[in-house]
C-alpha cells in the first residue's frame, strides 16, 4: 500500500515510516506526487483542519492520504492557544515568542490551575477523498512557570507531563529523549492507534 502524508515535515515522515513500513506501507510526501494544493486551515478545531487537508490531498493525488493537526490547549485559557498554537504570538512558528506569550497570559496563575494537554488529530481519507478514520491522541500535563530542558520544540520546554503511572511522569517534554516522548506523546499515541487500525481500514 502507498500512503501519502499531506505534510513535508521530515520528522513526521520518519515517525510514520517507523510505524508503517513493517506493515508493508510505503509513505509518500507531497514532493513525491508533484506537490499538493495549499489548504487554508480555517476550522475551529484540530480535526476539522486535518480533515480539510486529508480530503484535499486525496482528491488531488488519488491516493490514501493522512493529514494531521496538533497543538496545545490550556485549561485556564479556555483551550487557547488551540488551533492557533503555531501563531499564538502573531508570527507563524516563532517558538520563543509563543512561549513568552503563553507565560505572560498565565502570569499569577498557580501551578494547580495550569493544567493543559497536547492534542494530535489524524484524519485518513481514501483515494476518492472520503474520510475513513479520525483519530485523536492526547497527553495531559501542566504549564511550567519557566522553561525546562533542551530538547523538543514548540511548547515542549513549558509542558510538564503529569499523567500517573509512566516513567516519564513529572518530567518536561523538553527533558525527554525522542523515544521517551514518542512513547507517551500525543502524536505517538495517535500514530500507534492508526497503525493498529490501518489494515482493517484499507482492506
Image (cartoon, grey):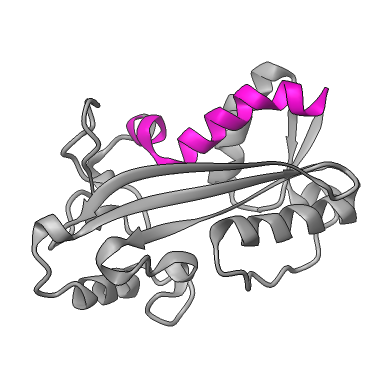
The quarter of the image holding the C terminus is top right
**Residue 61 on image: x %, y %:** 88, 50
Q: Nearer the viewer, residue 147 or 122?
A: 122
Q: Residue at x 18, y 40 (%)?
A: 171
In the rendered image, residue 134 lying in the magenta stretch gets the answer no
Q: Position of residue 81 (x, y in %)?
A: 39, 69
The x, y position of residue 122, in whole percent, is 61, 45
Residue at (52% x, 37% y) in the render: 190
Tag count? 0
Image coordinates for residue 40, horizontal then vertical, percent: 69, 72
Chain part drawn in magenta:
180-203
Q: Residue at x 83, y 41 (%)?
A: 126
118 on left or right of 136 = left
For the N terminus, give its image quadrant. Answer: top right
Specify the quadrant of the image occupied by residue 145. Answer: bottom left
Up-down relation of residue 161 to residue 182 (above or below): below
> Viewer-proximal residue, 173 or 199?
199
- Main SS, magenta region, reads helix
Q: Residue at x 50, y 48 (%)?
A: 120
Left or right relative to 65: residue 196:
left
Amino acid at each position: 500500500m502507498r500512503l501519502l502524508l499531506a505534510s513535508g515535515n521530515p520528522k513526521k515522515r520518519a515517525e510514520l515510516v517507523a510505524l508503517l513500513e513493517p506493515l508493508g506501507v510505503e509513505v509518500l510526501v507531497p514532493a513525491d506526487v508533484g506537490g499538493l494544493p495549499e489548504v487554508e486551515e480555517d476550522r475551529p478545531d484540530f480535526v476539522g483542519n486535518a480533515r480539510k487537508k486529508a480530503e484535499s490531498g486525496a482528491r488531488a493525488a488519488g491516493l490514501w492520504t493522512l493529514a494531521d493537526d496538533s497543538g496545545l490547549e490550556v485549561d485556564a485559557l479556555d483551550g487557547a492557544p488551540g488551533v492557533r498554537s503555531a501563531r499564538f504570538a502573531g508570527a507563524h512558528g516563532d517558538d520563543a515568542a509563543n512561549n513568552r506569550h503563553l507565560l505572560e497570559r498565565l502570569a499569577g496563575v498557580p501551578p494547580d490551575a495550569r493544567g493543559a494537554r497536547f492534542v494530535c488529530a489524524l484524519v485518513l481519507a481514501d483515494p476518492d477523498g472520503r474520510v475513513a478514520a479520525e483519530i485523536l491522541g492526547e497527553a495531559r500535563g501542566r504549564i511550567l512557570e519557566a522553561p525546562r530542558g533542551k530538547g523538543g520544540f514548540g511548547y515542549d520546554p513549558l509542558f510538564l507531563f503529569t499523567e500517573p503511572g509512566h516513567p516519564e511522569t513529572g518530567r518536561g517534554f523538553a527533558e525527554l529523549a525522542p523515544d521517551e516522548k514518542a512513547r507517551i506523546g500525543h502524536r505517538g499515541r495517535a500514530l500507534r492507534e492508526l497503525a493498529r487500525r490501518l489494515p482493517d481500514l484499507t482492506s
